[in-house]
Amino acid sequence: METAFLGSAFQKEHYPKTRSPIVAFAGRSNVGKSSLINRLIGRKRLAKTSSKPGRTQAINFYDIDGRWVFVDLPGYGYAKVAKQVRAGWAPMIEEFLENHSDLKLAILIVDARHRPSELDRQMKTYLENCGIDYRIVATKSDKLSANQRRRSIDRAREFLGVNTIVPFSAATGRGKKELWHIIREVCTHG
Ligand code: GTP
Ligand code: MG
């Protein structure tokens, strides 16, 4: 798979010019968005990851095989970054989601171990209100036993009001095939 970093932007005037269908990855800070992207494309470090929350502060664009564009959105909801920075995130994410006609799919990432937050629920509702096709993925599922995973995902489905949540792990690759299947399906027929 051929991948290339296309650039970072804080506002739409600076978005790189792209033509392929866009898949955007959203979720709270440090949930594992960049790691999930890297696992999907089989690269260790294309998208920068960090154990410190707030690593991805701009909107990052990646070309994937000249067929898709993956967009790593800044994480939301991390309390310890400066208030001003934090306040800038929601408008940045919203400006992107509302202004990109090539956006075909949003992957909303939650932590398999925890109940999703109110912000996750708001993001899901926001995507629905914008009419953006989305799927919810629960990452870090390697940290749970099969039983815990089932219970946690049921709880998250109920909290978010969705039928399906895809379990994923950047550590083991669990869910990778299923997620690719969804991306191909939605970007080809959606
Ligand atoms: P920001 O860009 O700061 O919002 O973070 P992010 O959502 O991009 O998270 P990132 O991919 O940087 O991962 C955060 C931390 O979680 C890193 O220490 C990763 O190694 C770890 N991590 C991410 N995904 C997984 C996973 O599936 N399993 C395990 N065990 N650890 C993970
Ligand atoms: Mg990141």
Image (cartoon, helix red, strand yellow):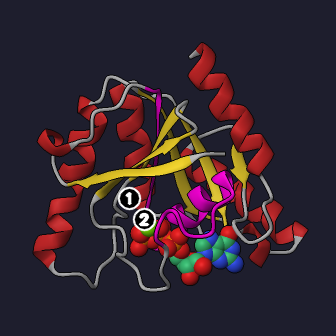
Find residue 119 and name its label: 1
Hey, which residue is sitting farthest top in the picture?
189
Does the residue at mark 2 contact the one at mark 1 (Cβ under 8 Å)? yes
Is 44 colored magenta in this rendering? yes
Badge 1 marks a residue whose secondary structure is helix
Q: Residue at x 50, y 85 (%)?
A: 51
Badge 2 marks a residue whose secondary structure is loop
Magenta part of the chain: 20-48
Tell me the crowding category of disc 2: few under 14, some 14 to 19, or many 20 or more residues within 10 angstroms, Cα based.
many
Q: Nearer the viewer, residue 115 or 186?
A: 186
Disc 1 residue type?
Answer: Leu
Residue 188 drawn at (x, y percent): 61, 18
Quadrant of the drawing holding the C terminus = top right
Tell me the crowding category of disc 1: few under 14, some 14 to 19, or many 20 or more residues within 10 angstroms, Cα based.
few
Looking at the image, how many numbered discs can be counted on the residues? Answer: 2
Is 65 colored magenta in this rendering? no
Q: Residue at x 86, y 74 (%)?
A: 145
Quarter holding ligand 2:
bottom left
Q: Quadrant of residue 111?
A: bottom right
Residue 165 visible, this orientation: yes
Disc 2 residue type?
Answer: Arg
Q: Quadrant of residue 174?
A: bottom right
**Which of the two marks, 2 or 1, is nearer to us in this view?**
2
Q: Which residue is mark 2?
A: 28
Q: Is mark 2 within 8 Å of ligand 1?
A: yes
Residue 147 drawn at (x, y percent): 88, 68
Task: Relative to 161, say whether 17 is above or below.
Answer: above
Does residue 64 appear to the left or right of 138 in the view shown? left
